[in-house]
């Protein structure tokens, strides 16, 4: 579903700057794996089935949207979800991890130093012996099959824009950059009409994602016009999972203007906030913007 987005800015300002903005409601897709989650996981789950894997093992923090979605859908593929969780497990599990276990998932807490080492840690080597037939997916579902799923998703979204006129810029959040890479790799048949992809990273230092996103996109589609990618790294609000009062107030204000719409605190709220600031600065004049809601609403369980 795509609908107009009402910003906190005056309409007269938007008219003066000739800006139009709509939102694609990825958060309303796929009840169990909303937003980008299903798209990053679907080809991985299929590949796990083809490989005959009994388990799918992935990584995430205690409030991870990715783990939450994985827990929700893996069993319907007859695959047991296994999570390597960053840091110690608290005696009282987070709501995200509680759901994961309730869905039949298994948790392995991992010391931060091991977690950082990813697939190279001794901890992972031991788990590989313990689960010799498992299928492994990196944090966030961000591998080439995840990018492929997001590239297909871009095509689905584009098909829905047909009756609404051209959006020359798609706007999306980034953690690892796999989702935006899939969008970038998607090109319309009339190649020159493919939208620019404007990325607002949720993490500090997100400008550094530029080369990762380009590389991911080129692996998916070697003809990708990588100049269509723009990253604005100024709106991380202190870093991943930080929710300062100003951003919280902004989320509430936007919700009151768009009662059917809730932004998530980690990813999409920073995108819309940043977008408004960039509009005011005059950096988005004459753009027809399509904001992609990538879901993540379960992430609110980490905040009061
Ligand atoms: C809700 C939400 N939006 C955006 C992202 C960023 O996606 P990516 O890591 O593919 O850049 C994530 C993380 O996967 C997410 O959970």
Image: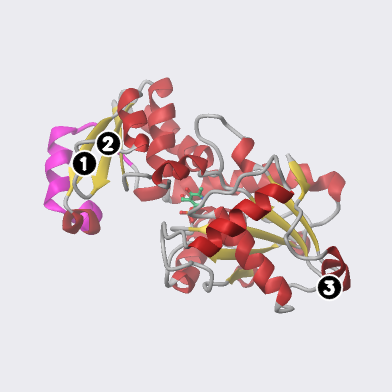
Residue at 26% from the left image edge and 44% from the top image edge: 85
Residue 154: image x %, image y %? 65, 48
Asked if the residue under mark 2 is in contact with the one under mark 1, i.e. CB atoms within 8 Å, the reply is: yes
Residue at 68% from the left image edge and 67% from the top image edge: 276
Tell me the residue that label 1 is attached to.
90
- Mark identifier at residue 132: none
Residue at 18% from the left image edge and 33% from the top image edge: 132
Q: Which residues are magenta?
A: 117-136
Q: In the picture provided, is 293 more to the left or to the right than 267?
A: right
Residue 119 lies in magenta, yes or no?
yes
Colouring style: secondary structure
Dot 2, crowdedness within 10 Å: few (<14), some or many (≥20)? few
Q: Earlier in the sequence, mark 1 or mark 3?
A: 3
Residue 55: image x %, image y %? 29, 29
Q: Nearer the viewer, residue 173 or 11?
A: 11
- The answer to whether residue 97 shows anywhere in this view is yes
Residue at 52% from the left image edge and 66% from the top image edge: 214
Tell me the residue that label 3 is attached to.
17
**Mark 3 C-beta to ligand 1 under 8 Å:** no
Q: Quadrant of the N terminus?
A: top right
Tell me the residue that label 2 is attached to.
93
Task: Identify the element where label 3 is drawn.
Answer: loop
Asked if the residue under mark 2 is in contact with the one under mark 3, i.e. CB atoms within 8 Å, the reply is: no
């Amino acid at each position: 579903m795509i609908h107009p987005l009402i910003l906190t800015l005056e309409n007269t300002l938007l008219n003066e700057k000739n800006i139009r903005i709509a939102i694609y409601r990825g958060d309303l897709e796929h009840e169990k794996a909303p937003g980008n989650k299903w798209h990053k996981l679907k080809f991985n789950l299929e590949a796990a089935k083809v490989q005959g894997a009994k388990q799918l093992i992935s990584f995430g923090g205690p409030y991870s949207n990715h783990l939450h979605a994985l827990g929700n859908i893996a069993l319907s593929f007859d695959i047991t979800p296994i999570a390597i969780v960053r840091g110690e497990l608290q005696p009282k599990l987070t709501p995200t991890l509680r759901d994961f276990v309730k869905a039949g998932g298994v948790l392995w807490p991992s010391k931060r130093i091991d977690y950082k080492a990813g697939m190279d840690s001794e901890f992972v080597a031991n788990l590989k012996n313990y689960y010799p037939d498992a299928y492994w997916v990196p944090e966030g579902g961000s591998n080439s099959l995840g990018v492929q799923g997001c590239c297909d998703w871009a095509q689905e979204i584009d098909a829905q824009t047909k009756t609404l006129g051209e959006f020359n810029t798609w706007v999306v959040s980034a953690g690892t950059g796999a989702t935006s890479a899939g969008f970038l790799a998607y090109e319309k048949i009339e190649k020159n009409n493919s939208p620019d992809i404007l990325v607002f990273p949720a993490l500090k230092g997100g400008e550094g994602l530029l080369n990762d996103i380009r590389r991911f996109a080129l692996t998916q589609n070697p003809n990708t016009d990588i100049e269509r990618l723009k990253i604005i790294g100024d709106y991380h609000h202190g870093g991943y999972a930080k929710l300062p009062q100003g951003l919280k107030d902004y989320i509430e204000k936007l919700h009151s203007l768009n009662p059917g719409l809730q932004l998530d605190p980690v990813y999409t709220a920073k995108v819309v906030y940043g977008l408004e600031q960039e509009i005011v600065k005059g950096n988005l004049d004459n753009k027809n913007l399509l904001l992609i809601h990538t879901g993540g609403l379960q992430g609110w369980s980490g905040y009061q």
